Amino acid sequence: MSGEPKAKTLAKRYYHKRVELFRLIDKIKLWPSRRGVLHGIKSIEKVGDTAFITTHCNKTFMVNNSRNSRAARWLRNKWFKDVCTACGVPDWKLAKYSSTQFKRHYGSLLLEDNKKQ
Ligand SMILES: [Zn+2]
C-alpha cells in the first residue's frame, strides 16, 4: 500500500456493484469464508477466470471470477461474523473496508489497476 496518503479520517470510497470479483479482492485483500469469518488474502494467482487464493492463515482454495458468487455478495454486503485471528488483519484494513460502499449506479469498476483512488 505504498504511495497512499495516510489520512487520519478515511475517505469513503465507492465501488460499483458490478465490479469484478477478482478486481475487488485484488484491491481489498479480504475474503469472507462460508462460516462467516473474514480472512486476509496473502496471494491471488489468476488463471483465466479462475484464481487460487491463499489466505494469511495458509488456506488455499479456488474461486471463479463471478460477480454473483456467494463471496462477491458477502463482500459487498459485509456479511461476516468474525475476523480470522490467525490472519491478523490490521485494523486500518478493516476500517478501510467498512468505509467502502457499493453502489448500483456509480462507483469504481477498478478497471485501471494503477489509477490512484
Ligand atoms: Zn484466516
Image (cartoon, grey):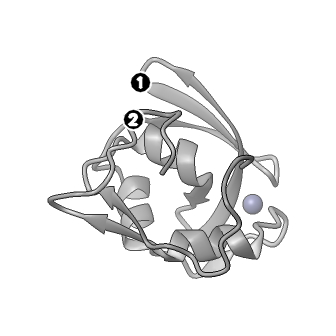
- Badge 2 element: loop
Query: In percent of the image, x 61 and y 77: which residue is there?
Result: 95
Q: Dots 2 and 1: beta carbons under 8 Å?
A: yes
- Badge 1 element: loop
| Count of numbered tags | 2
Which numbered disc, 2 or 1, marks the residue that appears first in the sequence? 1
Q: Position of residue 72 (x, y in %)?
A: 39, 54
100 up-or-down from 54: above or below: below
Label 2 CA crowd tier, 10 Å (few <14, some 14–19, many 20+): some
Image-based side of 42 in relation to 31, left or right: right
Q: Nearer the viewer, residue 31 or 1?
A: 1
Which residue does the numbered mark 1 point to in the structure image?
Answer: 49
**Distance from Cα at disc 2 to Cα at disc 1:** 5 Å
Q: Position of residue 98 (x, y in %)?
A: 51, 76
Image-based side of 32 in relation to 65, left or right: right
Which residue does the numbered mark 2 point to in the structure image?
Answer: 65
Q: Which quarter of the rendered image does ligand 1 occupy?
A: bottom right
Q: Nearer the viewer, residue 11 or 19?
A: 11
Which amino acid lies under the numbered mark 1 shown in the image of this protein? Answer: Asp
Query: In percent of the image, x 71 and y 66: which residue is there?
Result: 6
**Is the C-beta of the residue carrying label 2 under 8 Å from the nearest atom of ligand 1?**
no
Q: Nearer the viewer, residue 7 or 25?
A: 7
Q: Position of residue 4 (x, y in %)?
A: 66, 54
42 up-or-down from 111: above or below: below
Which amino acid lies under the numbered mark 2 shown in the image of this protein? Answer: Asn
Residue 86, picture quadrant: bottom right
